[in-house]
């Protein structure tokens, strides 16, 4: 839907629903640059906080593509976070691979595992699909709890030879004059930043493509889209597999950073799905901007309120429900009502 | 024949909404369907377009049995439809709504179909709304968008479900002129309509449905004059 689609003979001009893409692109590049340079000046805590923010945002973008566009309300994405994490451990500890290569491979293998998983859960509709994805994630958890070389039910840790084999740590240590653990965090930060930018770019380009047109149609009126020739099953399968790959890579990165894994943590529905759904819902489902806003809000709440324990969770839940009831388009929807702006011009208003 | 429906039956539990239906449409032909509310007209469209599966009977289209063929494949085979209650993609622009049908229904690239989409918008008087979000359209515009989107798929058979309701006399005349033009391009039409005078201005043949059954069929004016049909027609108009 770019302007080049309009041939000279036409008397009309096709615009995207977006405002000023060039300005938005410049701002985006600027933000990424600032974020890339941030570890030079930021404290180690802030660097760690940002890693958390980055991977929650990347997970949220994936879930939003899945649920907000393709209508696949999965509550089992922790299956791929855990799978990615365990693959990282297996490939580095047992396979002896470099961690960065292991992250990429974790993505590929997650996609391969997503195919047979989809054949099962895609037979289910609506609420049964959601429950099905959860059950599958539990099966994944139970399977990994049986694998003794990876610590079975109690889990295992990465050796320091693995965690320090990530390329760049030595250079960062020398260059910024920090100690090795801090240098490791900074390298993880850059990997996380790369991954979140890659995820945003992937989602953006998927939504701008032919597929994106179909996904927008499926989001708005699935049956009508089918009647216009859109192969719903194929597109949903493609989205499910693609998000599984991205989620698997994010999982691998998360557990490279944590350096310790256990089945209960890696396949946690609260950490890797409930919080992610919260982010997407409060930000605004079915838009790319929503999860960005949601992730920032979630990070701030986590940062300043998590000490309140159970009260924090009650607050999260209450906020989520209030937004669903009174602002179903999320915070981004509220902003749109107030001002007509779009950051990612993909024609979703 | 382009469309051949034989012995079609559809029941929801104990309610039968299509019963022993036979219907044919020749290439380029225009056939009208009338019948009271709840007669099963929309259900018939859903069965032809693939949204519903028949309980019994067969539907052949363009020489091919449609049993087990999913809606997207039926669209690509040449069945385009509108919905009685418009179903626009609200957060896409009007032009993008057409692109969905053109790109996926015809299996072409956006570039190849952009021109055709523009022409369809022009024909349906939606060109100046091309860049508006479909969610912002009025009911009349939404109905036009339904037709534009179906046409964008380059159908051989166009299924129209009550598109003239609520139009003024002038708008109705325009609609009739538009549908006549579409016919000239060789598209066959199956049109469900309560506004009988609009229907009669276009169609070659009229089918009357009641309680899921075909109770009359033939030359439109002759069919309308049958006492039993007249009875039902008075019910519809009232
Ligand atoms: N999915 C469904 N489940 C149960 N009953 C249905 C369904 N769809 C339609 N019906 C019933 O079938 C009958 C015919 O409906 P419809 O085809 O919409 O009639 P028409 O378009 O002629 O007004 C109605 O009584 C309606 O309530
Ligand atoms: Mg109807």
Image: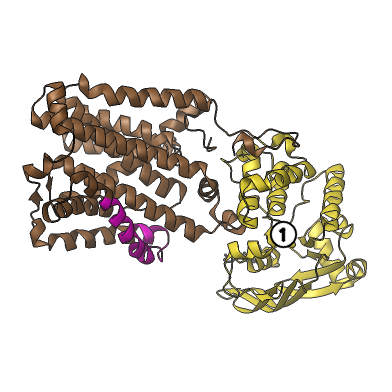
Where's residue B169, x and y in %? 86, 45
Where's residue B44, x and y in %? 68, 68
**Foreground residue among A329 and B168:** A329
**Foreground residue among A218 and A114:** A114
Q: Which residues are magenta?
A: A105-130
Rendering colour mode: by chain
Where's residue A255, x and y in %? 18, 45
- Chain A image colour: brown
**Callout count:** 1
Left or right? Give the position of A256 relative to B110: left
For the N terminus of chain B, give its image quadrant. bottom right
Where's residue B114, x and y in %? 68, 44
**Foreground residue among B77 and A159:** A159
Residue tagged by mark 1? B155
What residue do we see at 41% from left, 42% from top? A202
Quadrant housing residue A118? bottom left
Q: Tell me the chain of label 1.
A: B
Left or right? Give the position of B135 relative to A83: right
**Picture layout, residue A113 above or below residue A45:** below
| Element marked by disc 1 | loop
Q: Does A114 lie within the magenta span? A: yes
**Foreground residue among A256 and A339:** A256
Task: Give the main secondary structure of the magenta stretch.
Answer: helix
């Amino acid at each position: 839907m770019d302007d080049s689609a309009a041939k000279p003979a036409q008397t009309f001009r096709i615009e995207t629903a977006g405002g000023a893409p060039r300005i938005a692109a410049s701002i985006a590049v600027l933000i990424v640059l600032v974020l890339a340079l941030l570890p030079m000046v930021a404290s180690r805590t802030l660097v760690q906080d940002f890693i958390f923010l980055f991977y929650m945002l990347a997970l949220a973008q994936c879930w939003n593509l899945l649920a907000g566009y393709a209508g696949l309300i999965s509550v089992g994405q922790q299956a791929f976070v855990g799978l990615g994490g365990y693959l990282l451990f297996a490939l580095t500890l047992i396979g002896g691979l470099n961690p960065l290569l292991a992250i990429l491979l974790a993505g590929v293998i997650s996609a391969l595992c997503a195919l047979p998983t989809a054949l099962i859960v895609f037979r289910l509709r609506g609420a049964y699909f959601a429950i099905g994805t959860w059950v599958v994630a539990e099966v994944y958890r139970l399977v990994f709890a049986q694998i003794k070389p990876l610590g079975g039910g109690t889990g295992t840790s990465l050796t320091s030879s693995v965690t320090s084999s990530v390329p760049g740590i030595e250079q960062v240590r020398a260059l910024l004059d920090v100690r090795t653990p801090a240098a490791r965090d900074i390298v993880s930060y850059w990997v996380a930043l790369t991954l979140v930018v890659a995820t945003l770019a992937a989602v953006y380009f998927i939504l701008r493509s032919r597929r994106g047109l179909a996904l927008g149609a499926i989001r708005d009126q699935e049956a009508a889209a089918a009647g216009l020739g859109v192969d719903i099953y194929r597109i949903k399968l493609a989205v499910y597999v693609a998000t599984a790959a991205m989620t698997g890579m994010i999982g691998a990165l998360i557990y490279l950073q944590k350096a310790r894994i256990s089945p209960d943590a890696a396949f946690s529905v609260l950490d890797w799905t409930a919080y992610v759904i919260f982010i997407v819902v409060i930000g605004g489902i079915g838009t790319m901007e929503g999860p960005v806003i949601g992730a920032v809000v979630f990070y701030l709440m986590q940062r300043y309120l998590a000490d309140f324990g159970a009260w924090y969770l009650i607050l999260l839940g209450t906020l989520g429900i209030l937004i669903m009831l009174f602002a179903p388009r999320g915070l981004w929807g509220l902003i749109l009502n107030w001002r007509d702006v779009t950051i990612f011009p993909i024609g979703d208003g | 024949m382009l469309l051949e429906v034989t012995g079609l039956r559809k029941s929801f539990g104990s309610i039968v909404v299509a019963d022993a239906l036979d219907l044919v449409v020749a290439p380029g032909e225009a056939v009208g369907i009338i019948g009271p509310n709840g007669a099963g007209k929309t259900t018939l469209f859903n069965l032809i377009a693939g949204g519903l599966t028949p309980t019994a009977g067969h539907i052949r289209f363009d020489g091919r049995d449609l049993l087990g063929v999913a809606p997207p494949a039926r669209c690509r085979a040449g069945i385009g439809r509108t919905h009685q209650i418009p179903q626009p993609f609200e957060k896409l622009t009007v032009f993008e709504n057409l692109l969905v049908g053109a790109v996926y229904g015809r299996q072409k690239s956006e570039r190849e179909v952009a021109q055709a989409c523009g022409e369809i918008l022009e024909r349906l008087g939606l060109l100046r709304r091309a860049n508006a979000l479909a969610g912002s359209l009025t009911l009349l515009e939404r109905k036009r968008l339904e037709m534009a989107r179906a046409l964008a798929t380059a159908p051989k058979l166009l299924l129209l479900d009550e598109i003239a309701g609520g139009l003024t006399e002038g708008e109705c005349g325009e609609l009739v002129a538009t549908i006549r033009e579409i016919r000239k391009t060789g598209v066959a039409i199956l049109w469900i309509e309560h506004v009988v005078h609009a229907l009669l201005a276009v169609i070659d043949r009229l089918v009357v449905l009641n309680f899921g059954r075909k109770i009359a069929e033939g030359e439109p004016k002759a069919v309308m004059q049958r006492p039993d049909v007249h009875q039902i027609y008075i019910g519809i108009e009232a």
